[in-house]
């Protein structure tokens, strides 16, 4: 059941980041964005020595990481 919850949370995180950054992507891209955002968010939190303290904190860091990925992607995409 853990991997199913991870997939659902990844899709949710990617969807939330897309809504925040006003981007629209499909289910697979939302999952990949949520997955990559969770790694980036956790990495930045570890660098700043910030503890997530549970599921809600993990989701917030993941959404922040996914938003950062979308921001960087959109910056490069608009220049071309």
Image (cartoon, rainbow, N blue to C red):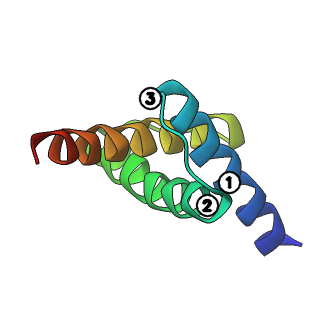
How far, Cα to Cα, is label 1 from label 2? 4 Å
Q: Is residue 59 left or right of residue 41?
A: right
Q: Is residue 78 left or right of residue 65?
A: left
Q: Residue at x 67, y 41 (%)?
A: 54
Residue 52 rendering spot, x and y as whole percentages: 54, 39
> Which residue is farthest front?
80
Label 1: state its secondary structure. helix
Label 3: state its secondary structure. loop
> Which residue is farthest right?
1
Residue 2 rendering spot, x and y as whole percentages: 81, 70
Q: From the image, tell me which residue sits under label 3.
A: 21
Q: Residue at x 62, y 65 (%)?
A: 28
Q: Residue at x 23, y 43 (%)?
A: 72
Camera-nearest residue between 14 and 24: 24
Quadrant hosting residue 11 = bottom right
Label pair 1/2, CB-CB below 8 angstroms: yes
How far, Cα to Cα, is label 2 from label 3? 16 Å
On residue 59, the disc is: none
Residue 57 rendering spot, x and y as whole percentages: 60, 35
Residue 37 rendering spot, x and y as whole percentages: 45, 52
């Amino acid at each position: 059941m853990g991997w199913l919850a991870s997939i659902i949370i990844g899709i949710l995180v990617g969807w939330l980041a897309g809504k925040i950054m006003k981007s629209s992507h499909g289910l697979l891209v939302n999952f990949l964005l949520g997955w990559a955002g969770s790694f980036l968010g956790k990495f930045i939190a570890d660098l700043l020595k910030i503890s997530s303290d549970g599921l809600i904190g993990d989701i917030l860091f993941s959404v922040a990481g996914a938003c950062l990925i979308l921001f960087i992607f959109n910056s490069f995409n608009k220049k071309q």
